[in-house]
Amino acid sequence: MTFSGKIKEEITKLECSKVEYISELSGIFRTTADIKLYCIRIQTENINVANRIFRVVKELYDVTASITIKKNYNFKKNEIYIIEIRKDVLKIIKDLGLLNDQGLDLSPVPKEFIVSDDELKQAFIRGCFMISGSVNDPKTSRYHLEFLIQEIKLANFLCDLLNSYNLNAKVLRRKKGHMVYIKESEKISDLLKMLKAYEGVMYYEDVRIYREKVNMTNRLNNCEQANIEKSMKSAKKQIEDINLIKEKDAYDLLDSKIKEVADYRIKYPESSLIELSEIISIETNSKMTKSCLNHRLRKIKDLAEKLRNE
């Protein structure tokens, strides 16, 4: 089962209040349902979501929906579950804010009472996610959570609803509708917690923390390797300068302290400046700082450049 499937399996087991169930159903119906005055028809590829809709409708309205299964031969050949509600349709759609005095009200934006407080807002988002959402497994993919929404008004409403919780959601037009998506790992974790997918949150955080540690270790290793290569390149250039000075019979132009540094550089060609300064300090019993060492090596470099120019 995919990570999205596991999240949906977890949240479809939640027990909620009646008003939360209504907001959740509203999110499901507005996202995907084909609604008529005599029938409500919903399609999903997730058996847990189909069972959730069946159970909630039965619990709230004592209506037994029918579930039909058909093969989907596109791509992964998943089964499609078709839920049809043909009894007490008017009562159901009225409760969900889909009926007014003129008849069906299929405006994509829900009525205010559907999302009147945080619990109802989160239930509405949960319904939208069940039927149209997906999230990448943090172990195998980049961080990404999305809702695929047909109506641009509903996509914008859902995006604004998510951003009321500082989730930094965005809307992107796709060939088949609009994608409301979140890319930041911390924001995705916050949304999973909001959906009450607590097991999913624990797994997600464990993987996210592990990946961050691995990335940090890799960055530190890269920095260390880069520093080593930089030190070796500098040491190689310093040795070339010293050898040039000797070849040009200009070594005696250096004073004794600079000669001492040159001799130690030749003797310890792979040492960094810090390591070399510590070696000189120990072997000569005279404090040699990195700054002082660097200053004397610069004198060697200046003389070598002068000889090259001549």
Image (cartoon, rainbow, N blue to C red):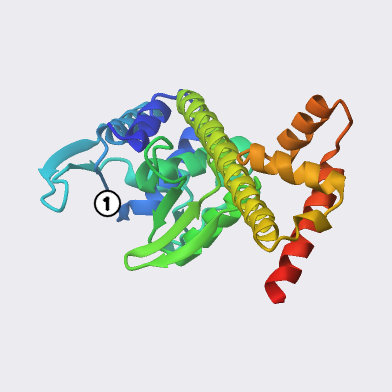
Residue at x 27%, y 40% (from the top left corner): 87
Q: Residue furthest bottom?
A: 310
Nearest the viewer among 174 and 44 is 174
Residue 121 in view, yes or no: no
Quarter of the image for the C terminus: give it: bottom right
- Looking at the rendered structure, the number of numbered marks drawn on it comes to 1
Q: Is 165 placed left or right of 254 in the picture?
A: left
Pick the residue in front: 111 or 124: 124
Q: Residue 114 in the image: x percent, y percent?
A: 55, 45
Quarter of the rendering containing residue 9: top left
Q: Residue at x 42, y 51 (%)?
A: 147
Where residue 172 sits in the image (x, y, percent)?
46, 64
Q: Is residue 294 left or right of residue 287?
A: left
89 shown above or below 197: below
Residue receiving disc 1? 38
Q: Nearer the viewer, residue 137 or 308?
A: 308
Q: Amino acid at mark 1?
A: Tyr
Closer-to-camera residue (51/247): 247
- Please provide percent x and percent y for residue 249: 71, 60
- Quadrant hosting residue 279: top right
Residue 73 visible: yes
Instruction: Please tell me in which quadrant of the rendered image residue 68 appears.
Output: top left
Give the structural element (helix, strand or loop) at label 1.
loop
Mark 1 closeness class: few <14, some 14–19, many ≥20 residues within 10 Å: few
- Residue 63 pos. (x, y %): 30, 32
Q: Quadrant of the N terminus?
A: top left
Residue in the image at 74% along x and 46% along y:
262
